[in-house]
Image (tube, rainbow, N blue to C red):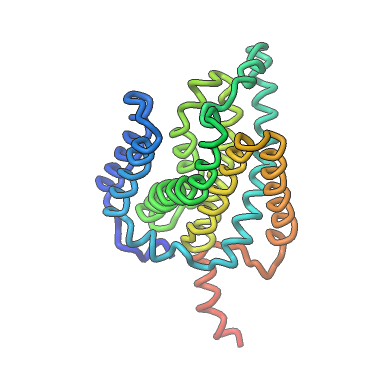
Amino acid sequence: MFSDEKKLSWKLYALGLIVIFSAVYSQYIIHPGIVLGFLIVYGIPLLATTAILGKEIIKKAGKNGDKALKLGLGLFGAFTIAGIFLSIIALIVILAFVPNAISLLDKPNPVLQIPPSLAWVMTGASILVVGPAEEYLFRGFIYGGLLNLFRGKHWISLAVASSFLFAAVHLYYVVTYGVASAVPLIDLVTFGMAMAMTYYLSGGNIVVPAIIHGVYDATGFVGVATSMTLGLLLRGILIIIGVVFAAVYLRRKNLQIQTPSSADHVEEEAPQNT
């Protein structure tokens, strides 16, 4: 599946990474407004990565939609629970060395420090722009590019690596929460793993990860636009749906969670067994 694509060069892949991280980190230096910020952080990287690997990303974007939806929601639910568990462990360890670290987490999320009227705009932008753009860049290009370079091998290790890169662009968590930033960063890594595994096991679908990502982010802005209680309720409902899908579908034999290459092999061998 990912081994029969036109081989990507390491130089072009490195160039794409440089463009992505330069664009994201530039906002901490030049402090652009919202519109210009979106153009820099998302527009420039999208143009660069599309020129490098866009054809391969787009042609698989909607592949195996039904399977991708079940996988996406199920893996999101499973990894969210895992992330919560690991975050609790990390927090216990941090508090053992830095007892006042818990107070750092009382600081508000800087992304959500916006007026309610703007929060409604960001709710829509999360679903229509942020989710799709970040999945295109981090699952489509960064993870998909690694799969291309390694010809589809080591997909789990590469999913981990791409998920750490995904967490790395959220520098504002480190700036805001200091040593306690390990807690939200763990959540980002586990979320990235869920989306990366969905991407790989579905054969390259990024539409489903984009929707899940966008809706998940949107719940935070709904909380700002209305009330934090409603935002948390909506996010909780999304997580519960994910957990249900994890319990029902990730254990069902008819879902056949296997690597694309092994699935192709089974299909090739099946006629000989009839």
The residue depicted at 37 percent of the width and 43 percent of the height is: 42
Nearest to the observer: residue 27 or residue 56: 27
On screen, 250 above or below 135?
below
- Give how far across and how far down residue 253 sits, in percent: 70, 67
- Give how far across and how far down residue 103 sits, in percent: 65, 15
On screen, 268 above or below 218?
below
**Residue 34 occupies which quadrant of the picture?**
top left
- Give how far across and how far down residue 266 sits, in percent: 55, 74
Residue at the front extreme? 117
Q: Quadrant of the C terminus?
A: bottom right
Q: Is residue 157 visible?
A: no
Horizontal side of 228 relative to 261 (left or right) equals right
Nearest to the observer: residue 125 or residue 236: 125
The residue depicted at 28 percent of the width and 48 percent of the height is: 48
Residue at the bottom extreme? 274
The residue depicted at 32 percent of the width and 34 percent of the height is: 22
- Give how far across and how far down residue 257 sits, in percent: 61, 62
Q: Quadrant of the N terminus?
A: bottom left
Q: Is residue 8 visible?
A: yes
**Residue 61 occupies which quadrant of the picture?**
bottom left
Horizontal side of 84 relative to 120 (left or right) equals right
Nearest to the observer: residue 160 or residue 44: 44
The residue depicted at 35 percent of the width and 52 percent of the height is: 149
Horizontal side of 46 relative to 218 (left or right) equals left
